[in-house]
Amino acid sequence: MRAKLLAATVAMAILMVGCGEEGAGQGSSPESEAEPGPSQAKQAQPKKPETVKGEVTRKPSKEQQKSEPKPEPASRNIPGLTPQDVYLNLENRGFKCSEPELMGPDNEVRWTCEKQEANGEYLVEINSSDANSVRLVEVWVISDDPARADALAQDFLGYVATVPSEGAQPEEAKAWVEQNVGSKASAEFGGVSYTLGGRADRRFLRLEKPEG
């Protein structure tokens, strides 16, 4: 009996010593502290930013579109023509011209020149986006005698057709206007569009830059 008890005690002692050595082996060592394992090294590396495939080709946001410069629209002005070229010549012919007025939501500038004679009335409007250019010139001749409307309009509309724009063809434009007064017609001379029209007692001429 005593021999069995002694053998059990020795066996337990051996078991405890073995457990102690195994626990010591699982502890940290200088080598493990100096060189972390693969999983530790992966965690230590900085995380790369995630990107979405095709991100570079995405359309810009609305905010980016607003900030990007937009192409400027083509000028609608009659090349080389200023408001002074028109209203100063009219004043020399006895017209009374108004001070420039701001018109519409775009604040366009308008000059109005008028003249009253015994046999009719003349009216000219000069429209511009600023004080140094002309976008549109509209001319009306109103006759007291509808039968004489063409004769009254011929001379004056022919005169306005000779405005000194860049590349102007004054003689050709004047001849065309005088020949076509009283009809609805349009033509282009020197990069300017000329449009004629009217009704019973009045005739009109419109000058502007052609579209396109």
Image: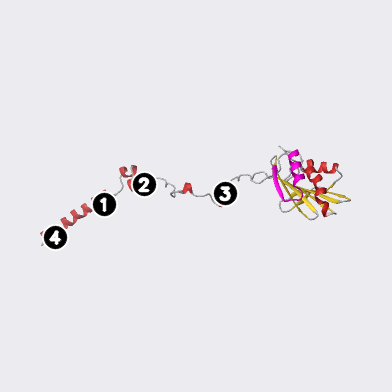
Task: Work out which residue is located at the far bottom of the displayed protein and give it.
Answer: 1
Task: Tell me, yes or no, if residue 132 can be seen here.
Answer: no
**Residue 30 placement (x, y as % from top left):** 31, 43
Q: What residue type is labelled 4?
A: Leu
Look at the numbered disc 4 and give the secondary structure of its residue.
helix
In whole angstroms, how far apart are the C-alphas of marks 1 and 2? 27 Å
Q: What residue type is labelled 2?
A: Lys
Split into 4 quadrants, where in the image is the C terminus? top right
* Residue under numbered circle 1: 23
In whole angstroms, how far apart are the C-alphas of marks 1 and 4? 28 Å
The magenta segment is 171-188
Label 2: few (<14), some (14–19) or many (≥20) C-alpha neighbours in 10 Å: few
Residue found at x 34% / y 48%? 39
In whole angstroms, how far apart are the C-alphas of marks 3 and 4? 92 Å
Label 3: few (<14), some (14–19) or many (≥20) C-alpha neighbours in 10 Å: few
**Residue 97 placement (x, y as % from top left):** 83, 47
* Residue under numbered circle 4: 5
The residue closer to the viewer here, 139 or 47, is 139
Label number found at residue 42? 2
Look at the numbered disc 2 and give the secondary structure of its residue.
helix
In whole angstroms, how far apart are the C-alphas of marks 1 and 3? 66 Å
In whole angstroms, how far apart are the C-alphas of marks 3 and 2? 41 Å
Q: Do the residues labelled 3 and 4 touch (CB within 8 Å)?
A: no
* Residue under numbered circle 3: 65
Look at the numbered disc 1 and give the secondary structure of its residue.
helix
Q: Compare marks 3 and 2 and give the one earlier in the sequence.
A: 2
In whole angstroms, how far apart are the C-alphas of marks 2 and 4? 54 Å
Label 4: few (<14), some (14–19) or many (≥20) C-alpha neighbours in 10 Å: few
Q: Compare marks 1 and 4 and give the one earlier in the sequence.
A: 4
